[in-house]
Image (cartoon, rainbow, N blue to C red):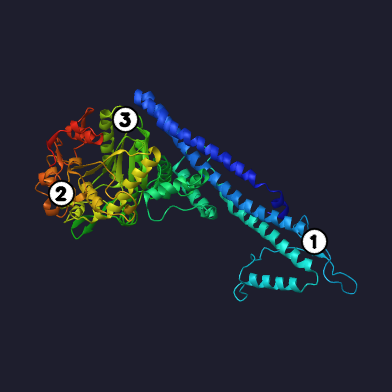
Amino acid sequence: MDYAALKALKPSEFTEAADGYKAVSDMADHAYGDTEGQISARLQAGLHGVALEAAVDSLRGLAKNFHYVQVECGLAATSLKAFAAAMTDAKKKLDDALEDAAHQNLKVGADGSVTYPPGGEEKDGKLPEGGTVTGSAKGKPAGTVIDPTRDANNLADALERQAANIHPNPNFGKAVAIANRIAQAVAEATEADALWAPKLRKLKADDDLVVSDGDWADAQSDTADVRAGAKDYLDHVKPPPKDGDPRSNADWWKGLTDDQREAYVTLRPASIGALDGLPADVRDQANRTVLAEKHGEYQLELNGIPKEPQPKYHYVQHGRAWMREETDDWREWNDKYADRKSHLRDRLDGMEVIQKRFDETGKGGLPQAYLLGFDAEANHDGRVILANGNPDTADHTAVFVPGTKTTLGSISDEAAKSDALWRQSASMAPGQSVSTITWFDYDAPRSAAPGDSGDVIPEAVHDEYAEKAAPTLRRFLDGTEAAHQSATGGSSHTTLMGHSYGSTVIGDTAKYRSDYADSWADPLPVDDVVVMGSPGMQADHAADLGFKGNHVWAMEGGGDDDLVTGGGRLIGLGDNFTIPTDESFGANKMRSDAEGHGHFWDEDDGKASLSLRNQAAVITGRYGRVDLEWEAH
């Protein structure tokens, strides 16, 4: 970019273009939400059959296209705004220099050179002659400390200033200063143009109607590229609080402008999606982008793994005997690719479960899903926080913590439990809104019994997994409350639920005292606690955890559940081997018809089990409908 181009430049045109892309992004976002959450949901709620499935499949493809358009146009809008900001700064520097030149009776040529008039003291009856100078962008801002021994540009600048000071015409120095300012402005504009032009050219999809894994992988690369370029643009925005206080996060978000919020969601979706205290719809938008981009990345990597060589075995003669051995090709492939392939497949399976839940909105009455947390690699086994319904506005909210062996790849079973809880709870609370949340944001033990996963001593006998999970669950609960208060001004009736080792996580969370808790409620911000198949909550009594006994509810199942809650009692998870279904613990013990450790959420042809109905009664505050074996005392 040259002087003439910068002088004629109107940065507002780029801002207007950014606004146009932002409008398209917003429209695509609304269309994405309407296609998935409204049209598909209504179709699936009231119709059935092959034609319906075909129509819904087409709508799912359309929704994915809208999502991609929303993300890419958001990137284009943010890129143009960052570019416009840089150009506005450069243009202002140029305009200021031209204004100062006019005040000093200096003329700026069409090429940016500066002509100065005669001036100074007469010599031999003549004034020192005027002239024309061309600036250099090497100059440093006024006040810069110059170290000629370390910076060649600083040395040149110092020599230039010295020359101006000894020049007989004082206008020479003024002209050089103006010319340098012009050159610096042009250089900054040229640098911004060189930075953003290729980035903007990259923001395009393949010329087809299918958004592929490759497109999403490219979108992830585009986001990183734009984020790096927009660092200066974001640096002027106050960053989120560093202390992790969800209430402060909520206040920070409220204090941003719409453009600043859009920039953060667009450029830092993973960070925004993980920020407790922010609105559920904001976290959902950010995490859906992370999910789509990560799925594209992982699927492309999986597709690039060579096929397993065949045959796997060959026969080798040893003496008179023939022995079956693995082929060298297969062994080499196995050493290099097998573990990675298994890992990618596990993560992709989990991602596809989440997407499937999005696609099933409306089926069986299921409300819109909100992805409140996602990270394919967090906590060793991944992070998934998935809500049925919006917890920010729900009358009743349940947060369900799963137990041992949970991974991203196995999240289907845990999400199904949350679905069942929502269905039964919603049926018990007509006219009220319910949100059930699957919270998996910790490294769950991989084994519950000797021999599981090859462990002689099961990992679930150790408390360390629950202890490490406690701060994270505490922040999430506080964040859920903060977001609800921001949205409604009040609180939701909240139930914290734990299955198996998940109940141990709840126990440690109740005992955890956060760094920011002094500024607001120290006890967990929940109304009720429900545990199923608990091996212990690291306490002798419910009161030791700060809970009121009449708001702590426990149940046990038959069959293999006895290994956990009966004679098997996992060592170390209940003080003095106490478990919540012991009468001495001081909780309400609910009756249960669960046949085993994983059957507390059974439904038979749409009819909920007693165990499930009891949980739903607590979630909705219908305590009189809970079938009790004994009451807390």
Q: Where is residue 289 in the image (x, y as percent from the top left)?
A: 43, 43
Secondary structure of the residue carrying tag 1 is strand
Q: How far apart are marks 2 and 1 (CA)?
A: 88 Å
Up/down of 591 relative to 477, above or below: above
Q: Quadrant of the C terminus?
A: top left
Q: Which kind of residue does numbered mark 1 sit on?
A: Thr
Q: How far apart are marks 1 and 3 (CA)?
A: 77 Å
Q: Position of residue 529 (x, y in %)?
A: 22, 42
Q: Is the Cβ of the residue at disc 1 closer than 8 Å to that at disc 3? A: no
Circle 2 residue: 541
Q: In this view, does 95 lie to the left or right of 325?
A: right
Secondary structure of the residue carrying tag 3 is loop
Q: Which kind of residue does numbered mark 2 sit on?
A: His
Q: Position of residue 91 (x, y in %)?
A: 66, 52
Residue 58 appears anywhere in the view: yes
Q: Nearer the viewer, residue 51 or 472?
A: 472
Q: Residue at x 84, y 71 (%)?
A: 121
Up/down of 277 relative to 604, above or below: below
Q: Which kind of residue does numbered mark 3 sit on?
A: Gln
Crowdedness near tag 1: few (<14), some (14–19) or many (≥20) residues, C-alpha within 10 Å: many
